[in-house]
Structures are given as C-alpha cells and as structure tokens.
C-alpha cells in the first residue's frame, strides 16, 4: 500500500480536476477524491474524470464517503468518516477486493476500525486544518504517540495508520518515529505539487 495519499481540493470541478492532474503529473500514486458540498451531478462527473486519469497514470483512486458512486465508476475503494456508511455495508456493496479506509480520532475509534475491519485508518487531525468543516479534537504528535503506546500495551499489531489533518513535509520524520504508516495530505500538495517527491523520499 502506498504511504502518501493526496486528498483532492478545490471549490469548482475545474479547480478539483486541475489539482488532481498536477498531483498526478508530480508523481502521486494515490488520490482520494473529496469535494464536500458539491452538487451531486458535478461530484459524480469529477469522480468519473478522476477514475479515468488515475487509470491513465496507474494510480489508486478512492472516493470520499460515497460508496455507491465508488461502485458505479469502479473506483479502487472508498474512505469513510465515522458518521458515514458502515465498513460492513460498504464491504458488501464493493466486494472483498476494494480498499476501504476509515477515519478515527480516538483510541476507541481506532479499536473500532480494527474490529470492523478496514484496510487502513485515517487518524487525525494532527493540527488545525481549514479544509475540514467539523474538525474533531486535535491530536498533535502527543496524541498519536499515546494511541500507538496504547495499542502496544494491549499487544495489538499496529494497523496501517495514516496521519491526516494539516500534515506538512516537516512532520513526516517524527510521525514515522512514532510508528505511523503513512500520511494523507491536501493543502501543501495542492499549493506546491512539486513537494510530492520529497514526501515520497522521506516516506520510503
């Protein structure tokens, strides 16, 4: 599984597509299509476009929240928030071979996600981020450390955890030391897609 996800950004379909294309041109290998409050027909169109250009770039394309759309366009999977469709229902709709990621904010969320089970956990937010409207309590590095320590104390295998929420390049080294598997980045890659190679180098 890739260790760097780009979460798409943009207020219009044109912005979204442009940002996805820039990320792909700069070597991203995993796109999560996320466009909150979009008109449904435009979101579906964006998902169809994204799936096609990701296929051309041999890149993973997953859809945020919308399980049925992911199935309809044959995306590689979905990412589900805590209040979205359950992992079990999504698995029944999408089948065994699709990627299903789940959001978590606390140790109990992480344990829930491990039991459900999902393929990876998006744990965050690391810090304040303007791309998320209803932000869960901020974890900071200490929050990640505590959750990993808690899992170790329970002698549980650490799942594939992606840090999410305001993550920038300078954070990667410390997150790796804590035991985080990968990162999902939106803002910094949108604003500076050339940074993708540096992310990939450190994450290797």
Image (spheres, rainbow, N blue to C red):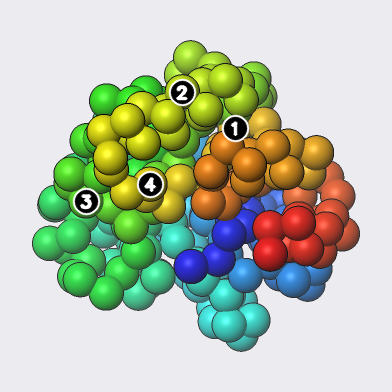
Secondary element type, mark 3: loop
Where residue 141 appears, as percent x and y from the top left, is 61, 25
Q: Which is in the foreground here, disc 2 or disc 1?
A: 2
Q: Nearer the viewer, residue 174 or 56?
A: 174
Where residue 99 appears, as percent x and y from the top left, is 35, 64
Disc on the earlier residue, 1 or 4: 4
Taking 7 as reference, is 74 left or right? left
The residue wearing badge 2 is: 146
Please tell me the numbered disc located at residue 165: 1
Disc on the earlier residue, 2 or 3: 3
10 Å crowding of disc 2: few (<14), some (14-19), many (20+): some
Residues at marks 4 and 3, CA–CA distance in whole angstroms: 13 Å
Residues at marks 1 and 3, CA–CA distance in whole angstroms: 22 Å
* Viewport quadrant of the C terminus: bottom right
The residue wearing badge 4 is: 158
Residues at marks 2 and 4, CA–CA distance in whole angstroms: 13 Å
The residue wearing badge 3 is: 117
Residue located 76% across and 50% down the image: 189
């Amino acid at each position: 599984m890739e260790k760097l996800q780009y979460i798409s950004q943009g207020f219009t379909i044109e912005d979204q597509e442009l940002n996805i294309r820039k990320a792909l041109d700069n070597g991203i290998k995993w796109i999560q299509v996320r466009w909150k409050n979009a008109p449904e027909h435009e979101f579906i169109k964006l998902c169809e476009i994204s799936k096609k250009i990701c296929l051309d770039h041999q890149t993973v394309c997953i859809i945020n929240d919308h399980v049925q759309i992911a199935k309809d366009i044959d995306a590689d999977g979905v990412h589900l928030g805590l209040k979205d469709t359950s992992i079990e229902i999504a698995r029944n709709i999408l089948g065994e071979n699709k990627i299903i990621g789940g959001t978590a904010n606390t140790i109990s969320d992480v344990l829930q996600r491990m039991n459900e089970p999902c393929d990876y956990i998006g744990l965050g937010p690391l810090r304040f981020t303007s791309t998320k409207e209803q932000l869960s309590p901020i974890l900071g590095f200490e929050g990640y450390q505590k959750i990993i320590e808690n899992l170790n104390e329970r002698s549980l295998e650490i799942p594939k955890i992606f840090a999410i929420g305001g993550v920038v390049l300078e954070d990667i080294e410390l997150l790796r030391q804590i035991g985080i598997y990968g990162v999902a980045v939106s803002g910094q890659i949108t604003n500076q897609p050339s940074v993708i190679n540096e992310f990939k180098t450190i994450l290797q």
